[in-house]
Amino acid sequence: MPPLYALAHHTVGRYLRRRWRPTVTGLDHLPHGGAILAANHLSVADQLFLGILTPRHIAFWAKAEYFRAPLTRGFVTGMGAIPVDRGGGRAALTAFDAAEPILRDGGLVAIFPEGTRSPDGRLYRGRTGVVRLAHRAGVPIVPVGIVGTDRLRPPGTRLPRRHPNSITFGPPIPVRVDRPADIRRHTDTLMATIQTLTSQEYVARHARP
């Protein structure tokens, strides 16, 4: 676990647990080896609570802009984040190249398959990158349901509010791709499983960034 991540996990985690009292269930579903944590995305707080409530280090994907800005470069690097260029093309695929060895070495990588935060609290159609990466690295996908983080700072408020929030880990989903259609099928199954963990309304189209 990177030193900065370990420090944040201890100090920030203790504060968050004391103030917001988040609940976590299903930690026994976390495998001992490599796996992708695939979660719904409601708030910028999702990464924080997921990182704090998971006992192992998680490598999050972060916008490449964070690695170029002086104020955030040291922080995201120290947290073991993986840069993602959202412009597409070969640049975007470098995130896959960086995540694959982490997974093969037994690490955890967190991905939000919707590709962006939900604009209205509903669950949107998943993008196939999470399944493609799981297939390449030979690891399972652990579905994660996050509830309540969108209410910590509702629109129009300046400071975070106390509101119940929870994270639920589901059983790992093995990925086997024998033909291209399997990629979309696995992605739809993953999103349906996440929906059972969150009870969100499902939208059969991609959310706009």
Image (cartoon, rainbow, N blue to C red):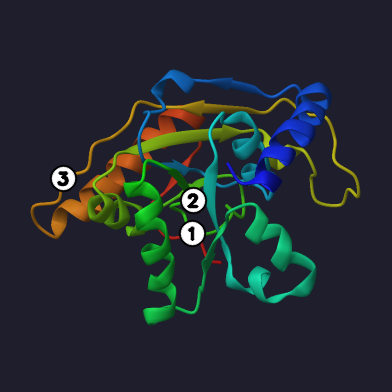
Q: Nearer the viewer, residue 49 or 162?
A: 49
- Indicate which disc, 1 or 3, sits on the residue closer to the N terminus: 1
The residue at the point 64 percent across, 70 percent down is: 67
Residue 176 is tagged as 3
- Indicate which disc, 3 or 2, sits on the residue closer to the N terminus: 2
Instruction: Judge the density around disc 3: few (<14), some (14-19), many (≥20) Cα neighbours within 10 Å.
Output: some
Instruction: Specify whether 17 is left or right of 127.
Output: right
Q: Nearer the viewer, residue 177 or 201?
A: 177
Instruction: Specify whether 117 is left or right of 144.
Output: right
**Residue at disc 2, secondary structure:** loop
In the rendering, at what x and y percent does residue 104 appear? Answer: 32, 48
| Image depth: mark 1 or mark 3 in front | 3
Gap in angstroms between the C-alphas marked 1 and 3: 22 Å
> Visible in this render: residue 126?
no
Q: Give the residue furthest to the right.
A: 158
Gap in angstroms between the C-alphas marked 2 and 1: 6 Å
**Residue at disc 3, secondary structure:** loop
Residue 115 is tagged as 1
Q: Amino acid at mark 1?
A: Gly
**Marks 2,1: beta carbons within 8 A:** yes
Q: Which residue is mark 2?
A: 112
The residue at the point 78 percent across, 26 percent down is: 14
The residue at the point 28 percent across, 43 percent down is: 139
> Visible in this render: residue 28?
yes
